[in-house]
Image (cartoon, rainbow, N blue to C red):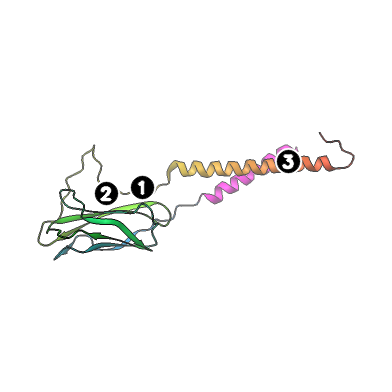
Amino acid sequence: MLRLRAVAVGCAVAVVVVLTSVVPASAHDQLLSSSPAPDERLPSAPDEITLTFSADVLDVGADIIVADAEGADWAVGDPAIASATVAVGLKEGMPAAGYEVRWRVVSSDGHPISGVIPFTVGDAAPLERAPASASAPAVAAPVADDPGVPRIVVVAALGAGIALAVLLLVSLLRRAARGRQPGKASS
């Protein structure tokens, strides 16, 4: 009867741990503004690209590419992160043309987010993408927000491990208490 009670307590603890740790995913940070703005036509090439997010981005995995129609990258160096702002300098001599800012950062909740910001310099035509074929995914495909099965498995395993630890602790404490009672022989 005592073992059944200990198992029931352990299972109850596991259920509570799993149910309280699996909460709905909060919305990821998002891009609030950029310079240049999406589809903006600039009279001359900018000196840098600046992205402003809804919260601080993590200082890992940030990447900004400023691509022209041939795929050449006009960004110089690594992106600089200052709280919720990410900036990267541009090479001199950018010709009048259409460009895409292809960005990827890690939001404050640890999930990667990405996007594309098209802009044009001078009187050139905006950069037009060829339709993506079935075998070639789009360069700026958004990152899925679904945590997927791995997170659920980790949380469930963690809950089961905690429940097992509690069950073993209760069992050991009861055995120790029985062994210390006067008149009882320890087994």
Q: Is residue 122 visible?
A: yes
Mark 2 neighbour class, 10 Å CA radius: few under 14, some 14 to 19, many 20 or more: some
Q: Is residue 109 left or right of residue 118?
A: right
Q: Which mark is residue 84?
A: none
Q: Residue at x 24, y 62 (%)?
A: 48
Q: Is 137 left, or right, of 165 in this rendering?
A: left
Q: What secondary structure is marked by label 2?
A: loop
> Which residue has dot 3 on it?
172
Q: Which residues are drawn in magenta?
A: 1-22
Residue that mark 1 sits on: 144
* C-alpha distance separating marks 1 and 2: 12 Å
Query: Looking at the picture, which amino acid does disc 3 mark?
Result: Leu
Q: Where residue 41 sits in the image (x, y, percent)? A: 16, 63
Left/right of residue 169 with respect to residue 25 in the rendered view: right
Give the percent coordinates (x, y) of residue 176.
Answer: 78, 41
Q: Is residue 140 part of the magenta span, yes or no? A: no
Crowding at label 1, few (<14), some or many (≥20) Cα neighbours within 10 Å?
few
Q: Kindly report the distance in space between the C-alpha atoms of the residues bearing marks 3 and 1.
A: 45 Å
Quadrant of the image containing the N terminus: top right
